[in-house]
Image (tube, rainbow, N blue to C red):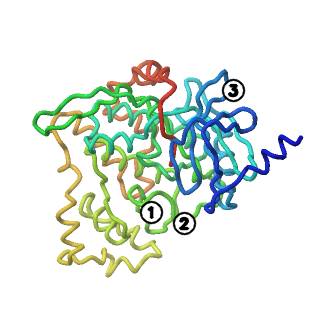
Amino acid sequence: QSNSRTRAQSIRDDEEGHLMYRSGDVLQERYEIVNTLGEGTFGRVVQCIDHRRGGARVALKIIKNVEKYKEAARLEINVLERINEKDPSPPSLCVQMYDWFDYHGHMCISFELLALSTFDFLKENNYLPYSITQVRHMAYQICQAVKFLHDNKLTHTDLKPENILFVNSDFTMTYNVEKKRDERTVKSTAVRVVDFGSATFDHEHHSTIVSTRHYRAPEVILELGWSQPCDVWSIGCILFEYYLGFTLFQTHDNREHLAMMERILGPIPSRMIRKTRKQKYFYHGRLDWDDSSSAGRYVRENCKPLRRYMLSEAEEHHLLFDLVGSMLEYEPNKRLTLAESLRHPFFSPLRGGAGEAPGDCAAGKAWEGNRDISR
């Protein structure tokens, strides 16, 4: 008893509400902390040895002892429990939750240990884009995972390269003589979708603004209401980023964001303009935007019609841009669904008998990665 009392007294939070811990600390007489994998506004993710899973390595998300983050964690647990309950075999490709508990005011969630996010890998590789074959396999899995959510009346709402993690991010290295640099190629493109902290069930309250800025659909910006199609828009933006190594809509301002959309995708439909409460962005039924301003020049110099970003005229590149263009359809009800996306000709090289990408199973066996599962 005196032991447990001493332990309780030594459990402290820092000024931001993070749990203070050291390598070797054991939580719940089960999770031995190895190291920190990542940090976000919500808390930290640590790698642990799970002594009740035969010493397997897991990722433990330790939420700050702050009410709003604890509430968000409870909602995320609710979603993860639904995913676990409905998860088919082969699995949905959403990250697997093993366990959750409240540790002295810190909600803790244990997950399968994954590797680098597709964004971190890109960043550590000097933003060298993924090959079209890699883009295809990653895209197919993302569409499968998010379709599973949509089939279960869920919208992820925060899809971005940071929330797509490799199962294993080991790579081969080659030296590019022309560019005088080492370039990495990930060995296995098996991925998982993570971070269900903002996932929303169809019947729940839909907050006005969702998604990280660069992946935010036009119906969200225009406050026209949103549902599953907003995830499809985000996936279109992600695939573009994998293929080219940079963000499609690099902006922090709504009006500029809409101007970039028009430059890349053509005019915003008048029906959406008529319906939006955000009339301040429009004048006489058109986007109120000055092409000759410095912001106008920035958009003109940095954005061009979508197809002009193609790196090759080969058919598979045309098919990818056809898929991305259909995902970046302004009108949510005209946007491709994920069921339709999975049948798109771009994916025909992957469609095996079980609707599973070749290499999925082998890649899936490389279950344990080495790093990050953070936001």
N-term-proximal mark, 3 vs 1? 3
Q: Which residue is mark 2?
A: 208
Query: Which one is in front in this view, the residue at disc 2 or the one at disc 1?
Result: 2
Q: Mark 1 falls on what kind of element?
A: helix
Estimate how packed mark 3 is, as few (under 14), some (14 to 19) or many (20 or more) residues with alpha carbons within 10 Å: some
At x 35% / y 25%, what residue is drawn? 187
Q: Amino acid at mark 3?
A: His
Whether residue 85 is visible: no
* Label annotation for residue 51: 3
Q: Earlier in the sequence, mark 2 or mark 1?
A: 2
Would residue 212 be found to the left or right of residue 306 on screen?
Answer: right
Rendered location of residue 172, percent (x, y): 29, 26
Residue at image mark 1: 219
Secondary element under disc 3, as helix, strand or loop, is: loop
For the residues bearing labels 2 and 1, Cβ distance under 8 angstroms: no
Give the Cα separation between the discs numbered 3 and 1: 47 Å
Indicate whether 299 appears above or below 187.
below
